[in-house]
Amino acid sequence: MTARIQGATGKDKPVPKSRATEMVVRVRRALWLVLGMLSLSLLLVLLGVYTTTRTESLNVSGYTSGVILTLGSFLGLLGLCLKENRKQLLTAAIIFLSFGIISSFVCLLIDGVCIVFNMDVRPLEAGRCQYYSSGSGYIYENFYTTVSCWNPQESCNMTVRSGTCYCCDLYDCANGGYLSNYYEFVGVRSCEEVFTLYILIWTLTGLNLMAFFTGILTTAVLGSIKDLRSNSPVTEASESTASSPTAPLLMNANTHIVHQLHPEASMYFPPAGTTAATQSFS
């Protein structure tokens, strides 16, 4: 009767989720996070390289963090998918992602503070910038010419190269433009392309900010997965041994032999385990 009651109460209890199932769910979520981090890193690389090659006057460094984060995300993806050397791969991924987080913060300062905030696009919006072209069909020919620049304070001459958008309002005639910030943009096809570069640098800065926080989250998740994967086999083996319903119970060899020789002896003499339990209870 007691066994039936215990069985009935045991059926009412909710079955806990196994550690293997929980591990699969966590790995799947971490896999989606790493894939998102990899896509963001590749976008950083492509956008940074494109922006850097548009002009020679802007030293954009946003793609550097994208390269490091791409390598870290790829190692994390391998660590989650492969069983061999999983701990070593996840450790290497965490190291590269940590360097990528630091580089994304540095690129955020360089591109966002040093470049974007020092670019004055007001003369471009007012249409006071000029574009010099050599007039030939060859884009990469370096022709130089001297143009006259004047502003409300002073006027002077400035040497510009072919394929350059220059703004005389931003050129300081007193020091020859050495202290001026981005008064010319070499290598562009028109002055309207400078607006596109301005928007691209702002986009690259926002992506670096997003990669900074996403990299921190990805590093934390991979660290937890790495620790769980190193401890899960021992824990699962101990739990399966302890809670297996089909595991055979160990029996006393002497009792089993006596029961085989004299099957009716159990009616008069209780087993040794029951006698020991009765003595300890009394």
Image (cartoon, rainbow, N blue to C red):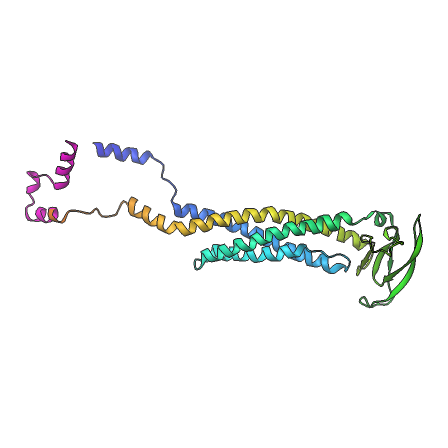
Q: Is residue 238 above or below residue 84?
A: above
Q: Magenta stretch: residue 260 in it?
A: yes
Q: Is residue 101 above or below residue 141?
A: above
- Quarter in which the C terminus is drawn: top left
Q: Magenta stretch: residue 148 in it?
A: no
x and y, in percent, of residue 3 in the image: 22, 34
Query: Magenta part mainly helix, strand or loop?
Result: helix
x and y, in percent, of residue 92 in the image: 51, 57
Q: Residue furthest front?
A: 175
x and y, in percent, of residue 10 in the image: 30, 35
Magenta residues, start to end? 255-282
The mark tally for this picture is 0
Give the side of residue 99 with respect to residue 229, left or right: right
Q: Nearer the viewer, residue 114 or 6?
A: 114
- Residue at coordinates 87% horizontally, 53% vertically from top-left? 172
Q: Is residue 13 above or below residue 61?
A: above
Q: Nearer the viewer, residue 105 or 237?
A: 105
- Quarter in which the N terminus is drawn: top left
- Residue at coordinates 54% horizontally, 54% vertically from top-left? 95
x and y, in percent, of residue 245 in the image: 27, 44
